[in-house]
Amino acid sequence: MDCLFCSIIKGDIPSTKVYEDETVYAFKDINPMAPVHVLIIPKKHLSSINDVTAENSAVIAHIYEVAAQLAKELGIDESGYRVVSNCGADAGQTVFHLHFHLLGGKKLKVEMC
Ligand code: AMP
Ligand code: ZN
């Protein structure tokens, strides 16, 4: 299967890694929308939130643990941040490997949609 983020996890496409463990990989977004813009992804391919089930949802909880840890390390835990996952066309999802944007380091726009 041809998936950009699977290729990044394999190391076939370069990325700026900020965190890695057995189940999760995190790297800097190539087109940052904020001073801190990290993508946190499961190593196992899931296309979007639509693929989350009772069988595989433990990784989602873990991604939020990693988000909290990275927010601390990157110095935005006190100032605030947003964790976003776009799902499908109306949300503007462009890469169909489930990912969570960790955004912070500036006052983010209040509008959610
Ligand atoms: P989304 O629009 O929610 O699907 O987000 C996809 C994100 O992936 C965008 O913010 C892109 O800037 C980012 N992106 C695309 N290609 C790369 C890449 N090679 N390395 C890092 N981030 C990427
Ligand atoms: Zn993938």
Image (cartoon, rainbow, N blue to C red):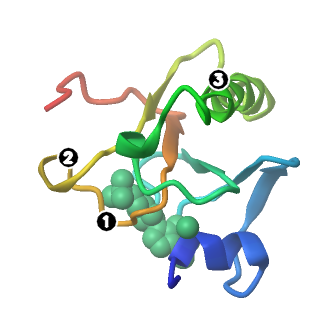
Is residue 87 placed above or below 64 in the rendered structure? below
Q: Position of residue 35 (x, y in %)?
A: 53, 46
Residue 63, located in which quarter of the rendered image?
A: top right
The residue located at (58%, 60%) in the rendering is 45
Crowding around mark 2 (Cα neighbors within 10 Å: few <14, some 14 to 19, many 20+) is: few
The residue to which callout 1 is attached is 94
- Residue located beneath label 2 in the image: 91
- The single residue placed furthest to the front in the displayed view is 55
**Amino acid found under the numbered disc labelled 3:** Ala
Q: What amino acid is labelled 2 in the image?
A: Ala
Q: Residue at x 72, y 69 (%)?
A: 9
Single out the mark in the foreground, 3 or 2: 3
Query: Which residue is located at x 77 percent, y 80 percent?
Result: 11
The yes-or-no answer for disc 1 within 8 Å of ligand 1 is yes
Residue 99 image offset from top left, x and y in percent = 50, 49
Q: Secondary structure at mark 2?
A: helix
Can residue 4 be seen at all in this image of the molecule? Answer: yes
Task: Inspect the image, locate mark 1, and give the three-letter code of the amino acid beneath it.
Answer: Thr
Locate residue 101 relative to residue 76 in the image: left or right: left
Residue 54 locus on image (x, y percent):
55, 26
Using the image, determine if residue 19 lies above or below residue 62. below
Disc 1 is placed on an element classified as: loop
User: Which residue extends farthest right?
Assistant: 21
Residue ID for mark 3? 61
Residue drawn at (57%, 16%), measured in percent from left and top? Answer: 79
Specify which label sits upstream in the sequence, 3 or 1.
3
**Sooner in the amino-acid sequence: mark 3 or mark 2:** 3
Pointers 2 and 1 in contact (C-beta within 8 Å) = no
